[in-house]
């Protein structure tokens, strides 16, 4: 069903119209989550993306109105609207945009109630703390601590919270004191629509080094298969001929085929065998 904005106040209509205008100017339209990003960092992100992407911050309901009026497959983005969504526009492909957005993320301290993005591990060893209440605070947060040599020492490496678990207030306070910043804060791409297709982050999170290594391995395996199966290609013909000559020479030597190219090797083999027999006789 079409979405109409005739009942909206003028300023809301302007917001919807602005999104629709940008959607016509750019080849990619997407959603990003702005939750928890300090205003200062938002401004820095905008500067970093200048000339690459435009971010439109407005209410989720107005984003939904605009996507509904744009219609078509673009409307599929509405199901990804959540939290503090904003609209992002770009002429880059979604893979490149995703990579750029990942670069805007910075590490920040965890707050009580937040979910750990990964296992948070406290390494054993000395700290900069002097003996005092900090020992009890560390222990209450599940971190084995003791006093050694006039300093507070963490006695063993400990995973204090698993990926996906909630960070407690006590642990959050201790992590700040230990200067451990586990939270990735930055624009999180929720979804992107480009060239008729909808892309989710799970598809866009490509490990380029891993993919390159896989391509290199596949290329080497294909080369080896071509050579060993004697399937000639422009890239492998020289290696196939070299292998064929080497195999033919080896066969001639083992079968004692007297040819001028291998006679020296046959004589050498015969000499080695005679020496081996001589040593056995002795």
Image: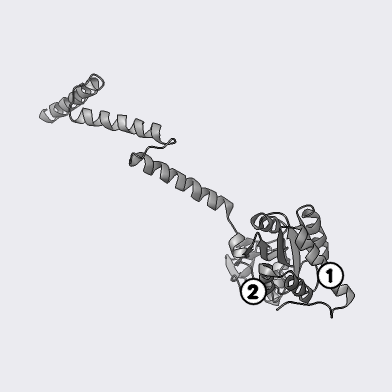
**What's the image's color scheme?**
one colour
**Which residue appears farthest toward the left when viewing the image?**
281
Viewer-nearest residue: 193 or 212? 193
x and y, in percent, of residue 174 in the image: 70, 70
Q: Please give the residue where the numbered disc 2 appears in the rendered image.
A: 139
x and y, in percent, of residue 266 in the image: 21, 24
Q: Residues within 10 Å of mark 2 (few under 14, many from 20)?
A: some
Q: CA distance from mark 1 to mark 2?
A: 52 Å
**Which residue appears farthest toward the right when viewing the image?**
10
Mark sitting on residue 15: 1
Rendered residue at 61%/60% (across/down): 204
In the shown orientation, is residue 263 left or right of residue 193? left
In the shown orientation, is residue 107 left or right of residue 21? left
Rendered residue at 64%/70% (across/down): 116
Q: Which numbered disc, 1 or 2, marks the residue that appears first in the sequence?
A: 1
Viewer-nearest residue: 208 or 76? 76
In the shown orientation, is residue 187 left or right of residue 58? left
């Amino acid at each position: 069903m079409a979405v109409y904005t005739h009942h909206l106040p003028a300023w809301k209509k302007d917001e919807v119209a602005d999104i629709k205008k940008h959607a016509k100017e750019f080849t990619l339209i997407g959603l990003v989550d702005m939750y928890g990003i300090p205003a200062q960092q938002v401004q820095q992100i905008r500067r970093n993306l200048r000339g690459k992407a435009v971010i439109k911050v407005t209410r989720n309901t107005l984003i939904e109105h605009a996507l509904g009026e744009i219609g078509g497959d673009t409307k599929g983005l509405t199901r990804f609207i959540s939290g503090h969504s904003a609209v992002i526009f770009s002429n880059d492909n979604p893979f490149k945009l995703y990579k750029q957005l990942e670069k805007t993320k910075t590490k920040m301290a965890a707050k009580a109630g937040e979910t750990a993005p990964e296992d948070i591990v406290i390494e054993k060893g000395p700290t900069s703390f002097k003996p005092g209440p900090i020992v009890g605070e560390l222990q209450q947060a599940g971190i084995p601590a003791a006093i050694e040599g006039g300093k507070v020492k963490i006695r063993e490496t400990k995973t204090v919270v698993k990926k996906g678990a909630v960070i407690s207030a006590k642990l959050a306070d201790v992590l700040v004191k230990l200067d451990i910043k586990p939270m990735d804060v930055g624009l999180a791409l929720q979804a992107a629509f480009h060239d008729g297709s909808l892309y989710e982050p799970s598809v866009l999170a490509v490990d380029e080094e891993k993919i390159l290594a896989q391509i290199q391995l596949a290329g080497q395996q294909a080369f080896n298969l071509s050579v060993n199966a004697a399937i000639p290609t422009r890239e492998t013909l020289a290696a196939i001929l070299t292998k064929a000559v080497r195999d033919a020479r080896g066969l001639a030597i083992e079968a004692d085929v007297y040819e001028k190219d291998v006679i020296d090797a046959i004589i050498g083999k015969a000499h080695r065998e005679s020496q081996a027999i001589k040593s056995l006789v002795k």
